[in-house]
Amino acid sequence: MDCTVHGVRLELVQGDIARQPDMEAIVNAANAELMPGGGVAGAIHRAAGPGLAEECRPLGPIRPGEAVITGGHNLPNKYVIHCLGPVYGVDEPSDELLAQCYRRALALAEERGIRSVGFPSISTGAFGFPMDRAATVAFRTMLEQIPRLRTVNHIRFVLWGADALRTHEAALSRCLEEAGLPSSEG
Ligand code: AR6
């Protein structure tokens, strides 16, 4: 799925967040210590090499909803934006903390003049957030922030598997409709 909202391209693809060479920045679904882990964090740190963990070490721990930015090291991306999503049912209010991750990631990207950002589906793996609900929070937040963006003009959600892609496509269609935007725009 691919649409343009207020001049910003919003794209949903199935794939691996650590293999998005055309994105200037990618987002990590981090742990508080910003250290390698499983899922997205494991894939990103493996591809980036040990220099990423070294740069991250003094920046942690961070709290749910917070984000920090580092270089991409051996990744094809110039930057990695590390977000700590909420653990579902533990870090509350979970919807707001998840929305904060997306807002802060975009704010950091704008501060650096970044044009393209790849996002994973934060909190929907080890942190247990129901995917449909997380996708709705993510896209409502994106649609609310997009009109304010000055440098970011391409946002890609990189979803792990066909089911995740379908769930996100359905959620984006609903959020576009809710915002009065046609899903065929662009
Ligand atoms: N590319 C894109 N999406 C992926 C990839 C990948 N390579 N691998 C998994 N996903 P998670 P969280 C999907 O667990 O829930 C880590 O161990 C996955 O299917 O990576 O925020 C950290 O160290 C799911 O839909 O992040 C933290 O401790 C989504 O990405 C903790 O897990 C997020 O899954 C963070 O948990």
Image (cartoon, rainbow, N blue to C red):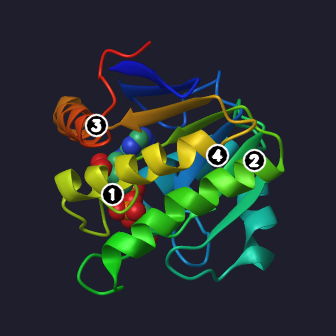
Q: Is mark 4 within 8 Å of ligand 1?
A: no
Image x and y of residue 107, in percent? 69, 56
Q: Earlier in the sequence, mark 3 or mark 2?
A: 2
Query: Image point 37% across, 25% down: which residue?
Result: 13
* Residue position for label 4: 148
State the image quarter where residue 62 is shown.
bottom right
**Distance (Cα) linking label 4 and label 1:** 18 Å
Q: Are marks 1 and 3 in contact (CB under 8 Å)?
A: no
- Disc 4 marks which amino acid? Arg
* Residue position for label 2: 110
Give SS at disc 1.
helix
Q: Are marks 4 and 2 in contact (CB under 8 Å)?
A: no
**Distance (Cα) linking label 2 and label 1:** 21 Å
Query: Image point 44% across, 54% down: which residue?
Result: 141
- In this rendering, position of residue 184 left or right of residue 62: left
Q: Residues within 10 Å of mark 1 (few under 14, many from 20)?
A: many
Q: Earlier in the sequence, mark 3 or mark 4?
A: 4
Image x and y of residue 89, in percent? 23, 82
Residue 65 against residue 22 in the figure, above or below? below
Give SS at disc 2.
helix
- Disc 2 marks which amino acid? Glu
* Residue position for label 3: 172
Q: Earlier in the sequence, mark 4 or mark 1?
A: 1
State the image quarter where residue 115 is shown.
top right
State the image quarter where residue 143 is shown.
top left
Q: Are marks 3 and 2 in contact (CB under 8 Å)?
A: no
Q: Earlier in the sequence, mark 1 or mark 3?
A: 1
**Distance (Cα) linking label 4 and label 2:** 10 Å
* Residue position for label 1: 137
